[in-house]
Amino acid sequence: MDMASLPRAVELASPGARNPRWQPGRPAALHSEIFAPAGEASGVGAALALALDGLRMRGRDAEGAAAEERSVLWVQDAVARRLGGRPYRPGLPKSLRHRLIHVAAKTPEDALFALEEGVRCRDLACVIGEVAGNPRALSFTASRRLSLAAEKHGVPLFLVRLDAEADLSSARMRWQMRAAPSAPPLWNPAAPGLPAWQAQLFRARSHAPGEWTLRTLRDGLAASLPDRVKAVEEASDTTLPRRTA
């Protein structure tokens, strides 16, 4: 038996042997959760970046209407508004300023109702939600309803969980996001750099878990592996001895 024809032990043990590693430009899941601290706006910033990256990939639908021209629904409960503030239109990407629909919900129950109604509306490009903590209303059953509605109607949902624990959920992709240092600007070192995040994908249906540094570019997102992840991958990529029998 030729042992060279068998997969390496490293390949069998790696999640990437079953699912490809996520990278910018791949189609986004229709229901994603992003866990982030409330005090640094990293969660909703990452949600916007992932949403815009996904919209560019969707392109035009069968009716010829550009997904980039549809409205975006942004829902916040009262605690999320108090912790992070309302959306500031002049600070949003230019392509979103004129088509943002903001819903200021009072309770998590009201926010979940608005989110579910939003993903049922095919005239929306995507839905972004912000919910603080771990409210009882956001149970596994409630998340399952959101997943089924988003997948049935094809409207992506990016739910930002502020200062929350990763409880049970049916979200297809679940992220941990934190702010990361920006790269120095090319022409003016004193100017603020482009946004960056330390991103950990800890659960996904169609991708292997992983960790990246995400940065925004003019034409979308860019991802690079942190140094410690590179070291682990290089160590695990050594070829095992093979023999024939």
Image (cartoon, rainbow, N blue to C red):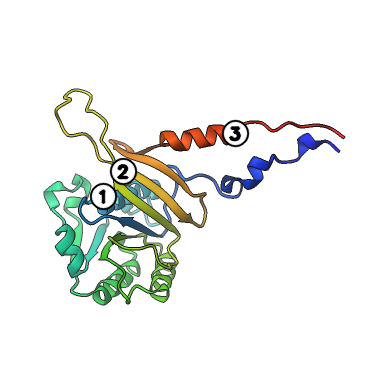
Q: Are marks 2 and 1 in contact (CB under 8 Å)?
A: yes
Look at the image and tell me in which quarter the C terminus lies. top right
In the image, residue 155 above or below residue 96 = below
Residue 147 falls in which quadrant of the image? bottom left
Mark positioned earlier in the residue sequence (1 or 3)? 1
**Left or right for 130, reference 153:** left
Q: From this viewpoint, is residue 125 visible? A: no
What crowding class fits label 1: few (fewer than 14 Cα within 10 Å), some (14-19), or many (20 or more)? many
- Dot placed on the residue nearer the N-terminal end, 3 or 2: 2
Alpha-carbon span between mark 2 and mark 1: 7 Å
Q: CA distance from mark 1 to mark 3?
A: 33 Å
Q: In this image, 144 relative to 208: left or right? A: left
Image position, residue 181 (x, y; %): 26, 37
Q: Of marks 2 and 1, which one's residue comes earlier in the chain?
A: 1
Residue at which label 2 appears:
197
Residue at 19%, 62% (x, y): give it.
Answer: 101
The image position of residue 169, as x and y in percent, is 42, 67
Residue 26, position as x, y percentages in the image = 44, 46
- Quarter of image, res 157: bottom left
